[in-house]
Image (cartoon, grey):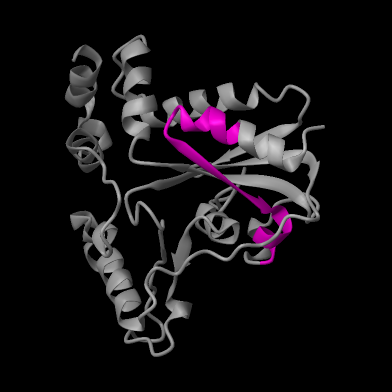
Amino acid sequence: MDTLSELRAKLAGLLHESGLECHPFKVGWYNANVKPGFQLEHPDDTLAFIIISSPSFFEKCFIPYVRNSIGNSINQDYLDQALRSCLTRAIQSFPDQKTSVLYDYEMRQGTRRPKVLVQTAGHVSGAVYFYQKTDILDPPWPVDKAIYGVCLHPKYIGWFALRAVIIFQNVLVPNLDFKPPKDILEEEGKKIDLLNRYNNNWQDWSFRDVVKPAERYSELQQKYFSTRPSERSDLIEFIRTN
């Protein structure tokens, strides 16, 4: 069986080609931070990785996938398929491991609950900081007002996405050290501003730039994500033929 360092280095190398990052965590860390209905049914020391798409994922993985795809169905979600293709190729490089992949959009059978809460997984891995209402000592909102949390990446700030969790079901890592995520918004006022931007004006994407990022989505990528899925057929055709 691969050691943790070997396994991690190999997976990171495979995913880097597609503009993806991976960060390890223990299933137990995740389970301790979610309600019972969202917990993963694996031993606490089981190894898992959060998968993050960097801004370059669009150019490195998505565009080549679209150009190599067959058909023009506007009902296809090419991004989900491109991601699944990349991760399938990666885990096939570990034939001796029993793995499972949980995608951010997948729901548990018979429920409306996600199979995995990727924001929590990202936080416990130390890869991103999950800013929530509970982080605010003196919240300005009504007690009963729902405030949705948002993650920031120390490098890409808001220009990234939490895509999936890969679980190595037979790999136990009791000695994996917990590394807390970096809080890049140390002042409470900045955290309140972030949560207000995300909850009240998420469409303008200003929450992604609360701190200057090292890299942003390209203009084409921004246009793609700003377009309704049902209206992306012309963009898909443009990507396929240019």
Residue 57 is situated, as x and y percent measured from the top left of the image, at: 37, 33
Q: Is residue 182 magenta?
A: no
Residue toward you, 78 or 23: 23
Residue shown at the point (27%, 35%) measured from the top left? 229
Quadrant, the N terminus: top right
Q: Which residues are magenta?
A: 11-32
Q: Specify the quadrant of the image occupied by residue 153.
A: bottom left
Residue 234 is situated, as x and y percent measured from the top left of the image, at: 17, 23
Residue 100 visible in rendering:
yes
Residue shown at the point (62%, 36%) measured from the top left? 9
Residue 14 is situated, as x and y percent measured from the top left of the image, at: 55, 28
Residue shown at the point (35%, 81%) measured from the top left? 187
Q: Is residue 141 above or below residue 84?
A: below
Q: Is residue 38 left or right of residue 205?
A: right
Q: Residue furthest bottom?
A: 138
Residue toward you, 194 or 77: 194
Q: Is residue 90 left or right of residue 167?
A: left
Q: Specify the quadrant of the image occupied by residue 211.
A: bottom left
Q: Is residue 158 left or right of residue 169?
A: left
Residue toward you, 102 or 126: 126
Residue 77 visible in rendering:
no
Q: Residue furthest top?
A: 70
Q: Is residue 14 left or right of residue 136?
A: right
